[in-house]
Amino acid sequence: MSGPLKTCVLVSGTGSNLQALINACRAGKLNIEINHVISNVANAGGLARAESAGIATSVLQHGLFSSRDDFDRALALLMAAGKPDLVVLAGFMRIIGPRVLQPFQGKMINLHPSLLPRYRGTETYRRAIEAGDREHGASIHFVTEELDGGPVISQVVIPILDDDDPQTLAARLGPMEHRLLVATAGFLAEHQVKCSDGAVIIDGKTLEAPLKLQENDQLGFNQPRD
Ligand code: GAR
């Protein structure tokens, strides 16, 4: 990939992961150009972060649409406007329907706060603690029709401590999610990464296990892939 990856980011919340991408771009550490941020929540913090960075923003309030399909149709049109090479769901809390998926298949990734395939959906921190897990983490996967079910590209793992509650666990995972997202976006900008038949293909080779962000990785994946 020669030029920067034109990137559209979808947010519903505070947008700390969007901010991590913006910061890495500003620092010249990431060969992507965020040219559009879209939110389904009018006062999402992520919108203000994008505006401060001079990035075009759009709001599409799902409650104002009469059906999920109408919302998806409008969302797909908005997303297409910036001709993105990459669409990042960074805390976008809406299920994406086929109308959105189809035109962006293989270009859309989602950040999810669990070690997929464990704990799809919500309340992942509480569920991991209640299950007695010793580890939790975050995953980035290609978005497919299956909720949080697309092939996983990368993960970061953190320990669950004896006195963790969902809040402390989420607070420790947050900064690692930022690093994972920046590292993964950087990886996508530097490699040919495809989603094919339920697998991740990197530079023509099937990824056997998700790329793992190591403790000492700042902006990349140290783990050799062969
Ligand atoms: C992140 O923790 C992300 O993993 C989660 O939303 C948060 C967004 O934080 N995403 C999901 O739960 C998607 N299922 P942010 O708005 O501060 O970037």
Image: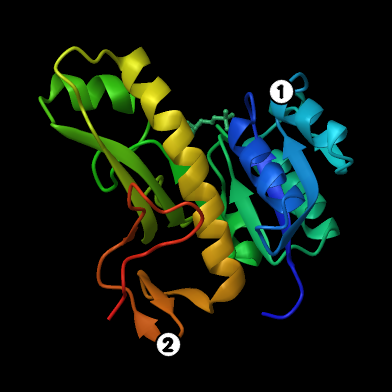
Which circle's residue, 2 or 1, is located before the other in the chain?
1
Q: Amino acid at mark 1?
A: Ala
Q: Callout 2: 10 Å neighbours few (<14), some, many (20+)?
A: few
Residue 91 at x, y percent in the picture: 56, 34
Q: Amino acid at mark 2?
A: Gly
| Ligand 1 within 8 angstroms of badge 1 C-beta | yes
Q: Residue furthest bottom?
A: 204
Q: Which residue is mark 2?
A: 204
Give the position of the N terminus as an image quadrant. Answer: bottom right
Secondary structure at numbered mark 1: loop
Residue 44 numbered mark, or none: 1
Q: Is residue 72 visible?
A: no
Q: Residue furthest front?
A: 216
At x 47% / y 60%, what residue is drawn?
A: 220
Q: Does residue 130 appear to the left or right of 224 in the view shown?
A: left
Give the position of the C terminus as an image quadrant. Answer: bottom left
At x 37% / y 50%, what residue is drawn?
A: 216
| Observer-nearest of 197 and 118 | 118
